[in-house]
Image: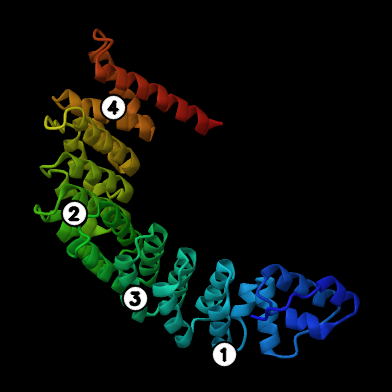
């Protein structure tokens, strides 16, 4: 960048267009911005792409910068290399990502690995995601390994998720089978990325990891969470099976996932889960039952009749969960059976089933009244 210190106001007063054009390349971002505004007021227009590039950088207009013709990739890279200001370098990198060409991608890979500012590296990851070329997968995985900065790692994971299933598979294999497999937070993020992206191979890998009893608990919980995000027949089957897993935390997340998917095939297994009695973690056994209750209410209409039948179950835990779920669904078909079971426990006014039935009847009446308005 040019090192002279121009007086922008004086040049504008003298209509010194040549001097102001030169000032667009000054190292001081405020001088560049003021020069651009002065030129606009003088009615100046760039005569070629080189002047337009300097003008747009001075204005921080990265969207327009990205639209410049193909020959400006090299000047953009040159401008990046000579730029001191982190925010401007970030903007230039953003423009390169929006352009989506091969030369820009090659340079973004270098920026991702070498720029001293973490936000500029994040922008490089975003740009690689915008381009969406599978050749960026390797450098993005490398960024996960090499950058301790959480923002860069997060940006790389987001970029890999946006590129799609091939990138997610690579990320999965790295985080779950590589040296960083002990990092629970990273595993959680990639599992959620899988969940958001879906795909047959992603689903298969998640199910495999969920069923592997040698995998630690937190990883298996994350797998169940991601399968709930993906949904579909295979995910539903795997989560139904996980409802009987030996680990209470996995069972809990399986129930939560089935609620998200809301597949009617899960109704009977979830009703069975209402009597989950984990003694290993004390109160955490209730978490599974609560998750199953919520899942049944999320399935909605198709769970009503099975839940009404579940009110006749001999196990009070099943009755309790079924009564609560029916209240959340709010279907008037449940009024009579809930009234009956409430009457059966009327002498035990503090009984859980009685209280659940009473609360659910009130909830159904409230929902019924709001619908009629």
Residue placed at 61% from the left, 74% from the top? 63
Label 4 neighbourhood size at 10 Å, few (<14), some (14-19), many (20+)? many
Question: Where does the image place residue 185, in percent across and percent down from the top left?
Answer: 29, 52
Which label number is shown at residue 70? 1
Q: Nearer the viewer, mark 2 or mark 1?
A: 1
Which label number is shown at residue 230? none
Disc 2 to disc 3, C-alpha distance: 36 Å
Whether residue 305 is visible to the viewer of this picture, yes or no, is no
Residue under label 2, please give it: 237
Quadrant location of the N terminus in the rendered image: bottom right
Q: Nearer the viewer, mark 2 or mark 4?
A: 2
Label 3 neighbourhood size at 10 Å, few (<14), some (14-19), many (20+)? some
Task: From this view, report whether residue 314 is shown above or below residue 22.
Answer: above
Is label 2 in contact with label 3 (beta carbons under 8 Å)?
no
Residue at the top extreme of this rendering: 347
Q: Earlier in the sequence, mark 1 or mark 4?
A: 1
Q: Earlier in the sequence, mark 2 or mark 4?
A: 2
Q: Nearer the viewer, residue 113 or 26?
A: 26
Disc 2 to disc 1, C-alpha distance: 51 Å
Task: From this view, report whether residue 210 is shown above or below residue 80.
Answer: above
Question: Where does the image place residue 231, in percent across and percent down from the top left?
Answer: 29, 56
Task: From this view, report whether residue 78 is shown above or below residue 7.
Answer: below
């Amino acid at each position: 960048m040019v090192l002279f210190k121009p007086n922008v106001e004086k040049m504008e007063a003298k209509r010194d267009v040549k001097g102001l054009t030169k000032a667009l390349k000054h190292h001081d971002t405020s001088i560049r911005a003021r020069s651009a505004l002065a030129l606009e007021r003088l009615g100046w227009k760039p005569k070629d792409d080189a002047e337009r590039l300097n003008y747009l950088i001075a204005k921080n207009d990265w969207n327009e910068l990205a639209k410049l013709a193909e020959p400006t990739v090299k000047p953009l890279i040159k401008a990046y290399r000579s730029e001191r200001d982190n925010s401007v370098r970030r903007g230039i990198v953003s423009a390169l990502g929006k352009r989506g060409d091969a030369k820009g991608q090659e340079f973004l890979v270098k920026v991702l690995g070498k720029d001293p500012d973490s936000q500029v590296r994040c922008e490089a990851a975003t740009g690689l995601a915008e381009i969406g070329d599978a050749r960026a997968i390797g450098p993005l995985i490398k960024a996960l390994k090499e950058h301790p900065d959480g923002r860069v790692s997060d940006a790389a994971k987001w970029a890999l998720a946006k590129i799609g299933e091939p990138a997610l598979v690579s990320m999965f294999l790295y985080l779950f089978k590589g040296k960083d497999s002990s990092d629970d937070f990273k595993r959680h993020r990639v599992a959620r990325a899988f969940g958001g992206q879906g795909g047959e191979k992603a689903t298969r890998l998640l199910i495999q990891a969920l069923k592997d009893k040698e995998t630690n608990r937190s990883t298996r919980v994350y797998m169940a969470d991601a399968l709930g995000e993906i949904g579909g027949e295979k995910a539903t089957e795997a989560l139904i099976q996980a409802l009987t897993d030996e680990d209470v935390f996995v069972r809990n997340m399986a129930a939560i996932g089935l609620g998200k998917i809301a597949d009617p095939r899960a109704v009977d297994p979830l009703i069975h889960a209402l009597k989950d009695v984990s003694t290993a973690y004390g109160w955490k056994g209730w978490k599974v039952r609560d998750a199953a209750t919520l899942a049944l209410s999320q399935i909605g209409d198709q769970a009503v009749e099975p839940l009404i039948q579940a009110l006749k179950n001999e196990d009070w835990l099943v009755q309790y969960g079924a009564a609560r779920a029916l209240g959340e669904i709010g279907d008037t078909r449940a009024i009579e059976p809930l009234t009956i079971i409430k009457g059966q426990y009327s002498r035990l006014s503090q009984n859980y089933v009685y209280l659940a039935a009473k609360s659910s009847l009130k909830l159904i009446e409230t929902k019924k009244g709001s619908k009629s308005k």
